[in-house]
Amino acid sequence: MKVSLQDLAIFGGTSSFARPLHVGRPNIGDRAALRARMDEMLDRRWLTNGGPYLEEFEQRLAGMLGIRHCVATCNATVALELAARALDMRGEVIVPSFTFIATAHALHWQGITPIFCDIDPRTHNIDPERVEALVTPRTSGVLGVHVWGRACDVEALGAIARRNGLRLLYDAAHAFGCSSREGMIGSFGDAEVFSFHATKFVNAFEGGAVVTNDDSVAERVRLMKNFGFVDEDQVVYSGSNGKMSEASAAMGLTSLESMEEFIAINRRNYRGYRRGLGDVPGIQVVACDAQQRHNYQYVVLEIDERVTGVSRDLLQQILRAENVLARRYFHPGCHRMEPYRTLFPDAGRTLPHTEALTARVLLLPTGTTVGLEEVGRVCDIIRFAVENASAIAARRGIIDDGAAPS
């Protein structure tokens, strides 16, 4: 417990945690089950190219999500690229800037121009009203992102796509196992893409998947992920190498078996943070809709510096000194990263809600390596920082000016 400024590690005190607390440290699941699968894989000597684990993983995902087709890939970025190409996206595609950079890059690498759209500040998702205003004759599609696992306004976006003859793709990297009022995420638009990266609550070491109810889209993605081969030596389509390995599929299956345990731990931690920070002025833990299925993968703070007296960035520095590796998502926004800040130097003027949110959001550690005791200590640090904001800011200013702290 911090009782004075000198106790803060940023001012020379001892860090609260001997080992770093990470945002998104990998979940492992049943190691014995994973080792058994790996041994069986090695005995079969079938390591890639559509082995039995890959087929089982795809079938289980499709069954869980209630969709016709699941095509597993080596990672979610390649899955986005394949899906965009399978949907014949070209010209311009409307996409939020408040997302991981891979969302925009997957378009740009295809020669598609990402047109950055502002978000709804209440949901953090792409704003359908702004989408409609950005549609031009060059627009071929919309790429929505289910941020924090909370579904986009799929009804409004679907209506916009139908009215304007646009393809609709969703980046669901945050949203595996989540639902909306309209059903499970994975069944919306023309296709959706999931991530099974090591930092996701269900992981395949590294992996992704395209899911769709469209037979022709699924067929094109399957061809493209394997160089366009339709059989052993006949190529019928231009393609690349996006295959998921058997080792990744084995890890994916093992993760799925522990999925409910992972969600329960995430939910426990989320509720602990809500209890610990619920009455701290200027700190809001972004809420998950209790009426919908959620994976609780991210614990997201919105920090109102006008109330807390301590900025998001200073709070992050305080936490990091304590070995709490809080993260700024998705700072500073795709439109302020290359190549987009050069291509669209004035984009920020049309993205006021995005710019405001990238300065307010901070993600806290959770997952199977974080317990309620750690959650409570993180909350204590944040509470102490807010209660002593003026003194911390003043002392930090003295240090930054080069004077020796007293």
Image (cartoon, helix red, strand yellow):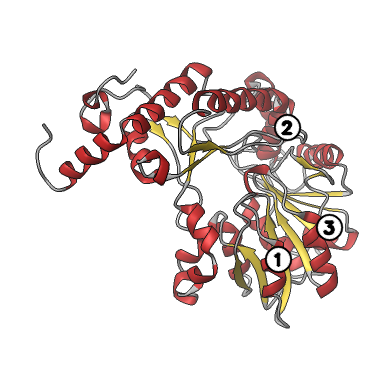
Q: Earlier in the sequence, mark 1 or mark 3?
A: 1
Q: Secondary structure at mark 1?
A: helix
* Mark 3: amino acid: Ala
* Mark 1: amino acid: Glu
Q: Earlier in the sequence, mark 2 or mark 3?
A: 3
For marks 2 and 1, give the CA distance: 26 Å
Which mark is nearer the camera, 1 or 3? 1
> Where residue 380 sits: x, y (%)?
41, 23
Q: Is residue 61 left or right of residue 193?
A: right
Q: Tag 3: Cα neighbours inside 10 Å, few (<14), some, or many (≥20)?
A: many
> Where residue 14 sits: x, y (%)?
26, 22
For residue 241, say whether it is visible. no
Q: Secondary structure at mark 3?
A: helix
Vertical relation: 119 (above or below) 340: above
Q: Is residue 102 left or right of residue 390?
A: right
Q: Is residue 53 left or right of residue 173?
A: right
> Where residue 114 sits: x, y (%)?
61, 70
Locate residue 7: give its quadrant.
top left
Q: Are marks 2 and 3 in contact (CB under 8 Å)?
A: no
For marks 1 and 3, give the CA distance: 30 Å
Residue at (64% x, 33% y) in the render: 296
Which dot marks residue 290? 2
Vertical relation: 270 (above or below) 343: above
The residue carrying mark 1 is 129
Which dot marks residue 218? 3
Which dot marks residue 246? none
Tell which of 210 and 10 is nearer to you. 10
Residue at (40% x, 46% y) in the render: 306
> Where residue 105 sits: x, y (%)?
57, 64
Vertical relation: 262 (above or below) 247: above
Q: Tag 2: Cα neighbours inside 10 Å, few (<14), some, or many (≥20)?
A: few
* Mark 2: amino acid: Ala
